[in-house]
Image (spheres, helix red, strand yellow):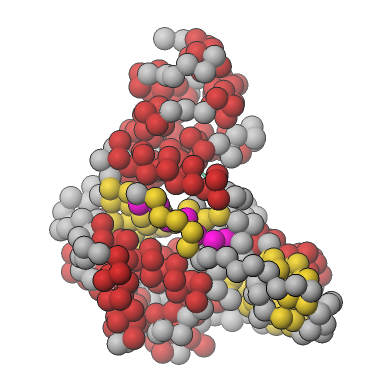
Amino acid sequence: MRAVDIIEKKKKNNPLTKEEIDFMVQGYTQGQIPDYQMAAFLMTIYFNGMNYDEIANMTESFVNSGDSVDLSRIHGVKVDKHSTGGVGDKISIIVIPLVALCGVPVAKMSGRGLGHTGGTIDKLESIEGFRVELSPEEFIENVNTYKMAIVGQTANLTPADKKIYALRDVTATIDSIPLIASSIMSKKIASGADAIVLDVKVGSGAFMKNIDEARELAKTMVSIGKNLNRNTIAIITNMDQPLGHEVGNSNEVKEAIKVLSGKGAKDETEVALTIASYMCLLGGAFDDFEQAYKELETKINSGLALEKLKELILIQGGNPEVVDNPDLLPKAKNTFCVYSEVDGYVNKIDAELIGISAMLLGAGRKTKEDSINYGAGISLKKKIGDYVRKGEVLCELHTDFDNVEEATKKINDAYTIKDELPEPKPYVYEVIQ
Ligand code: URA
């Protein structure tokens, strides 16, 4: 087989065989195929797409390029969740205790934040003492005993995806649905999940800017799941503005605590309960969505959900007192306000700009090597549909820096304020299964 023939075949829009895809993926990972041939190959996929069989084969090839996590010693159906990336997305922190309370094992592997999006691992590390590096034995034991554990990704999972993602980043081939779908699903499958709930974000802060693209990505990932025998459900959710009111690491932990105590913002409460309900359905705890949703609300209202979060923090070495006293979480030295320059209704909040602003305040990383300030972040005082008067506070900025000029400008650019009230949009658009 020769790489050039495979590129030629895909250029002519002919479907590739499993062997041809494997030849390209493994050859590139092992250094036998150069960057320029893989770059050309990726561009043919960008323009011509792939059918569902090709995408499943690509996913499997990514999985086979590295290690896979063996969760077979965990009893029950291991259900994972994944978000395609948003701003203020603290849903994982909310759903882990909720799903575990229903007896479904949650063996969660999560990532760190980069650029305008945050990462669950960074958020949890803002809790004093919280350990995200557990040995495989401790991880499995915690899931078997408490039905939950979370770790940062350490094993050599999907090295092909890592290498190809880096090349996509510099060859303008990130925004290709077959490539995004196989990249995401390969990591979930290599992490050992039996079943997967995907939170596909759509809107200004998401990869997918419109519902048609989001639906196509969702359908593609569900088809990969079917093809590779992982029960998969995708939920398309709104990312036209940050979720909830808080962005930043300790800020988001505080807000997750609020949701678990029944006092959370409507948007993130509904998204979290929807995702947790589908995780419970896939895990076999309930037969019916409404029943699961109701039961999860009961777990919140009874205080059990908050107790389970305390347990998660305790078993991972963190200080559980933060749940009753969130003021123990790290705080930034300074708070600055951004004021509205006009009267009117908030019509849009560009979530990506809010995320970039939070990064500039110290809450996120520009590059993987940057360190972060756990207390830095943004509190949104006005969200879409709210009325604001000139001079009223739109956002509070929390930071150790003294100069917030650039971050303030991004916040002002992020808000669109008009005389008319915008059409309300749902928090959850569609469920694809
Ligand atoms: N997230 C991933 O893991 N991969 C992509 O290609 C895009 C988003």
Q: Is residue 3 above or below residue 39?
A: above
Identify the image quadrant of residue 290: bottom left
Residue name at image x 42 percent, y 68 percent: 272
Q: Residue at x 40, y 31 (%)?
A: 52
Please give the name of the residue rendered at 56% of the width and 16% of the height, measured from the top-left corner.
11
Q: Position of residue 424 (x, y in %)?
A: 60, 69
Q: Where is 423 relative to 7, above or below?
A: below
Residue 345 horizontal/vertical position (percent): 73, 75
The front one of 382 and 7 is: 382
Decide which of 103, 113 is in the foreground and name it: 103
Q: Main secondary structure of the magenta part?
A: strand
Residue at x 28% of width, y 45% of height: 230
| In magenta segment, residue 234 | yes
Residue 35 is situated, as x and y percent measured from the top left of the image, at 57, 24
Q: Image quadrant for the N terminus?
A: top left
Q: Nearer the viewer, residue 22 or 243?
A: 243
- Compared to residue 193, the image places residue 407 above or below, namely below
Q: Is residue 30 visible?
A: no
What are the residue bounds of the magenta stretch? Answer: 233-239
